Amino acid sequence: METWLVIGISGVTNGGKTTLAKSLEAYFTAHQNKVFFKDNLTLNKVVALCQDDYFLPVDNPKHEVIKKLNHINWEIMSSLDMDRMCQDIMKVLGHKFILYNCQQLGQSEDESQMGEQVEPMDAYNLFSDHFLSNFLTKYDENGTGRTTNLIKKSKNESYQNMNIKINVLLLEGFLIFNHNFTRDLCNIKFHIHLPYERCYARRLQRVYDPPDVVGYFEMCVWPMYEKHYREFKGRKDIYVLNGEIPSESIFNYVLNCVKDLL
């Protein structure tokens, strides 16, 4: 059974989320098989998944077209194959896994309807079952109903003396905190924000395939970003980062947050 630390990185377009994710991946990869911030933790596997790799093909009928622009709306969840992304995540995590140092989720409406109960948080838990069973079943290709395991701290066992090999999964994407599965999976969450003018200036420097049409940023990209950001803005479990500061400073801050979590 493997132990995973899942780091979520979201943000506005051109905010620097990909730069941050790649920097973290490079840093963690360079420290594989070494002590990971604490004497009892050893860094094992490092895996990174990017939401941009799950955009649907241009000719997919699920796309929504903005009539005024005659252009696909790429800024919404229906432009992505999230089922495939979640299935790939489950493949990475393996059949049985532990999420490191998570907080217990409350019971969802779906679980209530299914008659399943969520065990209350135990003060002695080292690891807490962080997943909703309906999501685990949905994204399990084999249909075996896999579950995460709950490990309780023995009264005679010191957590500091447990030697743990820990894996890191980096999830990066502009809508990962707007999808229940990917949001709730992340042990630690970071969102990079930019003001309108700075974001627009950076967007003009990028070339997209298919390319942006005139008015796409003003009519779609920014309004959709604001809408999606409002859905999780103010959550205490998401660190909001200033995308205007140097990327190296953002990287160092995030690394310190991960260290503090461990």
Image: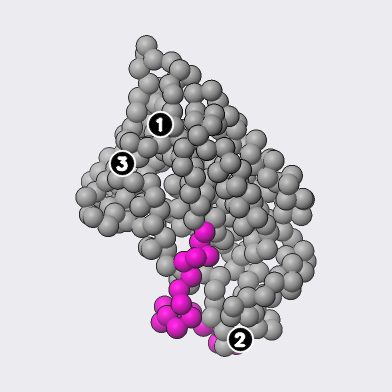
The stretch in magenta equals: 50-69
The C terminus - image quarter: top right
Amino acid type of the residue tagged 1 in the rendering = Phe
Judge depth for marks 2 and 1 and give the one in front: 1
Q: Which residue is mark 3?
A: 96
Q: Residue at x 65, y 64 (%)?
A: 13
Judge depth for marks 3 and 1 and give the one in front: 3
Q: Using the image, determine if residue 155 lies above or below residue 85.
A: above
Q: Residue at x 24, y 48 (%)?
A: 145
Residue nearest the observer in this picture, 180 or 26: 26
Amino acid type of the residue tagged 2 in the rendering = Leu
Residue 203 on image: x %, y %:
71, 70
Predominant secondary structure in magenta? loop
Name which quarter of the figure residue 165 lies in. Answer: top left
Tell me which numbered mark, 3 or 2, is placed earlier along the sequence. Answer: 2
Mark 2 vs mark 1, CA separation in Å: 49 Å
Q: Is residue 130 visible?
A: yes
